[in-house]
Amino acid sequence: AQSVTQPDIHITVSEGASLELRCNYSYGATPYLFWYVQSPGQGLQLLLKYFSGDTLVQGIKGFEAEFKRSQSSFNLRKPSVHWSDAAEYFCAVGARMGGTSYGKLTFGQGTILTVHP
Amino acid sequence: DTEVTQTPKHLVMGMTNKKSLKCEQHMGHRAMYWYKQKAKKPPELMFVYSYEKLSINESVPSRFSPECPNSSLLNLHLHALQPEDSALYLCASSQVYPGRVEQYFGPGTRLTVT
């Protein structure tokens, strides 16, 4: 069964500082990996995704993530954080259900990002 | 356009009420999902519809009844809910092509059961 671990429940950074959010996954095959962001009381917005190919993927809002198969990791990075990045971030691994036409996402527990001015 | 819309935004209902949540997408996605999310927790999958047919029911109590009237619309009918059912209910949709399992989420309905 697939699983996702986000080791950091809460991270605080200063505005303008760099950011790295950690994500480790467990999955038997090549995973589909995602990062979502959720502002308070809102839905989840897809930041970026990895399916195959280049292991460094670019997303929206200046975020990027690197897939490292040897470490089973998919860490999210941003070189300079803005106050508007304060939110909760979820890493997820996706699996297509056999020969079916839908996928199933397994989420990590989330990391809350606080940004200090 | 990757928009999923949900109505209402907020809902307060008593334990004897019947209400419905609505979700709509016009991206041509043929898989649609209902999730329940409690505070400080990740979303929990409730139901999956694929080509308007129920494909997954994650052992959800019968007081939650999903419906998919057409390929763009997904409803969640609520009846005799409990206070512990108060949560953010999220709808999502995805394409059905191989390699395209990413899901696009709506803004959610904040449900309070009194």
Image: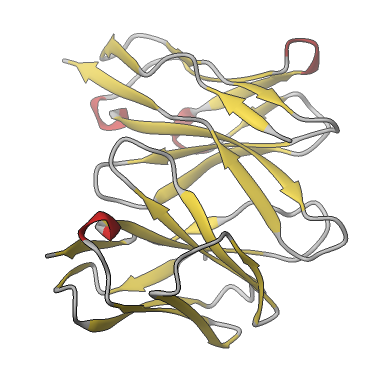
Could you tell me residue A19's position as x and y percent? Answer: 42, 13
Task: Look at the picture and state if B37 lies above or below B83.
Answer: above
Could you tell me residue A103's position as x and y percent? Answer: 70, 55
Could you tell me residue A29's position as x and y percent? Answer: 86, 33
**Residue at image coords 29%, 11%:** A13
Task: Look at the picture and state if B101 lies above or below A18.
Answer: below
Apparent side of residue A29 relative to residue A31 in the rendered image (left or right): right
Could you tell me residue B97's position as x and y percent? Answer: 80, 63
The mark tally for this picture is 0
Q: For residue A82, which quarter of the picture?
A: top left
Apparent side of residue B73 relative to residue B53 in the rendered image (left or right): left
**Residue at image coords 52%, 66%:** B1
Q: According to the image, what is the colour scheme of the structure?
A: secondary structure
Q: For residue B84, which quarter of the picture?
A: bottom left
User: Farthest residue in the bottom direction?
Assistant: B69
**Residue at image coords 37%, 19%:** A9
Q: Quadrant of the C terminus of chain A?
A: top left
Q: For residue A40, which quarter of the picture?
A: top left
Q: Quadrant of the N terminus of chain A?
A: top right
